[in-house]
Image (tube, rainbow, N blue to C red):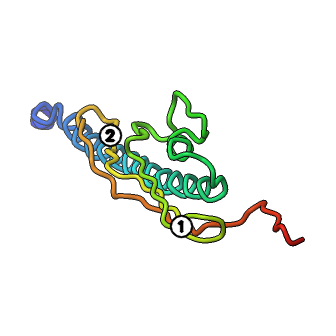
Amino acid sequence: MIRIKACRENERGATLVEFAIAATVFLTSMFAILEFGRALWVHNALTDAARRGARYAVIHRSSDIDSVKNVVVYGDPAGGTQSLVENLTTDNVTVSYSNFSLNSGSVTVGITGYQFQFVLPFMGTTISMPNYSTTLTAECVGLIPADL
């Protein structure tokens, strides 16, 4: 009986050490999954923002470039105070028209230089997201031809 008691005293704290190791691995895995999910969400949101801006530029032919940039960043041609994607600014957005007129040409809206910021404090780093670009051809939406 004395010998069993001596073995148990030598193993005191072993459970705590095992728990600490297992909890560290588990929590690191969980935070990695959450951050990867956030990065994927931002990737999809940036892709959608470029598409939204290109669609707005095609439908509203007379709109200026700043309005298109505001649609990409804020979802509103008039602008706003909070961007749809954190840290996205109009400086990240490029708009270019190519021979754009009624029913001909195209518009390209791109998002470049976006930095994804990790939330976890001990990671405190950013990664560069790829460049996003959407090109759409001109449309004659809502135009009634004169010969009708």
Closer to the camera in the image, 43 or 14: 43
| Mark 1, secondary structure of its residue | strand
Closer to the camera in the image, 104 or 128: 104
Which amino acid type corresponds to the residue marked 1 in the rendered image?
Ser
Q: Quadrant of residue 96?
A: bottom left
Residue wearing tag 1 = 106
| Mark 2, secondary structure of its residue | strand
Instruction: Quadrant for the N terminus, please.
Output: top left
Instruction: Quadrant for the C terminus, please.
Output: bottom right
Residue wearing tag 2 = 117
At 48% from the left edge and 65% from the top edge, which residue is drawn? 98
Which amino acid type corresponds to the residue marked 2 in the rendered image?
Gln
Q: Quadrant of residue 12?
A: top left
* Rendered location of residue 102, percent (x, y): 65, 66
Above or below, comparing residue 78 to residue 69 in the picture: above
At 53% from the left edge and 40% from the top edge, which residue is drawn? 70
Determine crowd level at label 1: few under 14, some 14-19, many 20+ residues with C-alpha closer than 10 A: some
Q: Nearer the viewer, mark 2 or mark 1?
A: 1
At 43% from the left edge and 54% from the top edge, which residue is drawn? 43
* Rendered location of residue 91, percent (x, y): 38, 41
